Image: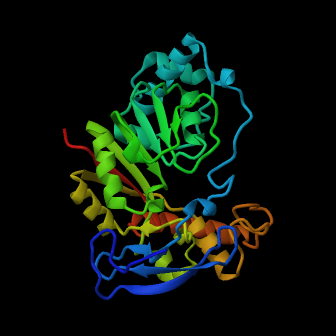
Amino acid sequence: MSISLDCRICGNSQGNREFKVLEMFYGTREEFTYFECQSCATLQGTKVPDDLSRYYPPGYLGPISDQSEADVRPNPLRLFLKQQRVLYLLYGKNLLGWLASKIGEDYFGYTWEWFRKAGVTPASRILDVGCGPGLLLKNMQYQGFSNLSGVDPFQEKTLPGLNIHRTEINKLTGQYDFIMLHHSLEHMLDPAGALCELKRLCSPGGTILIRIPVANCYAWERYGVHWFQIDAPRHIVIPSVRGMEILAERAGLRLNEIVFDSDELQFCCSEQYMQGISLKDSRSYVINRETSFFTQAQIESFKQQSQDLNERGRGDQACFYFRNPA
């Protein structure tokens, strides 16, 4: 195991505070050492296991469908109509897309805001880094996006009909108009190097979206080592907002916007951890919301608190939109 108290983001080695965190996603309760950077407030693992792959067992990154590849290849007319519909849903200026949107409901299940802010079209070159089996990519494919790729070094089985590379991003070639990292940067040992690779892969004027837990947030202050987003040992580096700004400066990227998108899980899961209930426990709110020990009033309160924290920039996760200068 490598041991260091040098911050992986700002390089500070003075006054960094160590603490112990238990593995509570599966509830093995294996102990890991983390530290908080005194300078940029980033949280990070002190001792990184040599074989991280064993902490990503089958099913960690999502279920695999039995759907055949033929099921996800729409005929050309259907694909065209879906693409027009996406243009309307994104930008509201496509008459044919408006008509197509009236035929069926919007079953996407994700926020269109990510794509709207990136200025993408159904034909844009899009890369999902840390895509797991490809659940988001598959949903995008259903919507009519036609130029999709994914990369994930740990995922062995993927959904059919997708272009997913089982490798590291430094092995990828080509360029993309929109690169997404949905809670994957925190799993990387060298986030600074990763952002440099992302800049290399991003087309001039393109957008990089990084959704990630944010250190120095209210949930960390309230729950400390029980904050569920630490997710030891899988989350190696959890940057603060300042940490993300430093990463952008070092990579030569422009940070355009920050949107906090935390939800009630920052309270529910962290409260469970304090009670010794893991994320995968049968009593967990994530596993069965009907049988969890939280009342409906508590859940509504957690949701309202989360919304308030997001508006104040104090939520425990955020979307960072970077632009690669042309």
Q: Is residue 107 left or right of residue 251?
A: right
Taking depth in this image into account, of 67 and 260 the one nearest to the observer is 67
Q: Is residue 204 left or right of residue 218?
A: left
Taking depth in this image into account, of 275 and 98 the one nearest to the observer is 275
Residue 75 percent location from the top left of the image: 60, 13
Above or below, 131 against 319 in this view is: above
Taking depth in this image into account, of 2 and 188 the one nearest to the observer is 2
Residue drawn at (37%, 47%) of the image: 170
Q: Is the image coloured rainbow, by chain, by secondary structure, or in one colour?
A: rainbow
Quadrant including the C terminus: top left
Tell which residue pokes out farthest to the left in this image: 326
Residue drawn at (53%, 45%) of the image: 131
Above or below, 233 against 68 in this view is: below
Tell which residue pokes out farthest to the top in this image: 77
Taking depth in this image into account, of 288 and 237 the one nearest to the observer is 237
Above or below, 171 against 291 in this view is: above
Residue 179 appearing in the image: yes
Residue 22 percent location from the top left of the image: 61, 79
Above or below, 135 against 17 in this view is: above
Q: How many marks?
A: 0
Residue 72 percent location from the top left of the image: 64, 24
Q: Is residue 169 left or right of residue 23?
A: left
Residue 241 percent location from the top left of the image: 34, 66
Residue 217 appearing in the image: no
Q: Is residue 49 left or right of residue 195?
A: right
